[in-house]
Amino acid sequence: MDNTAKKHDVYQAIADPTRRKVMELLAKQDLAITDIAKQFPISRTAIVKHLHILSEAKLVTSQKNGREKLYTLSPEPLADIKEWISYYERFWGNKLSMLKHLVESDEN
């Protein structure tokens, strides 16, 4: 039996609204944990846990900067999600075309 902890994937990482907000902040600039935590009504410890999950999913990286750790967004893993969603876009396009046809035929 494998006793290693299960890593979080990109889908699990972006499922939480707090983690998505952290990613939005990091998309603008690299930030230290303290600066990230100031943006949320939750504890610094909770932010550290969110950053850990984002790190496991390879969505953020960290680098020591003096006594602080700076976090940087690494958006590359989001390409997997984009690819997955793009497969389903064809279904949305078909539904919109059918809706347009129905609306236009009701007008006549």
Image: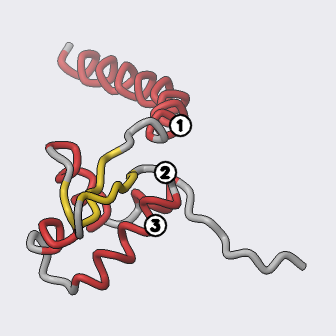
Residue drawn at x 18%, y 57% as measured from the top left: 31
Pick whichever of labels 3 and 2 is earlier in the sequence.
3
Q: CA distance from mark 3 to mark 2?
A: 9 Å
Q: Give the farthest residue toward the left.
A: 38
Q: In the image, is 85 to the left or to the right of 28?
A: right
Badge 1 density bin: few <14, some 14–19, many ≥20, Cα 10 Å: few
Question: Viewer-nearest of labels 3 and 1?
Answer: 3
Badge 3 density bin: few <14, some 14–19, many ≥20, Cα 10 Å: many
| As drawn, 45 above or below 84 | below
Where does the image place residue 77, in percent across and percent down from the top left? Answer: 49, 41
Where does the image place residue 64, in percent across and percent down from the top left? Answer: 32, 59
Q: Nearer the viewer, residue 8 or 29?
A: 29
Q: Give the farthest residue toward the front.
A: 66
The amino acid pointed to by label 3 is Ile
**Helix, strand or loop status at disc 3:** helix
Q: According to the image, label 3 marks what residue?
A: 53
Residue drawn at x 25%, y 24% as measured from the top left: 103
Q: Which mark is residue 80?
A: 1
The amino acid pointed to by label 2 is Lys
Q: CA distance from mark 3 to mark 1?
A: 17 Å
Where does the image place residue 88, in percent across and percent down from the top left? Answer: 51, 32
Q: Nearer the viewer, residue 84 or 46?
A: 46
Quadrant location, the N terminus: bottom right
Q: CA distance from mark 2 to mark 1?
A: 12 Å
Q: According to the image, label 2 marks what residue?
A: 58
| As drawn, 26 above or below 102 | below
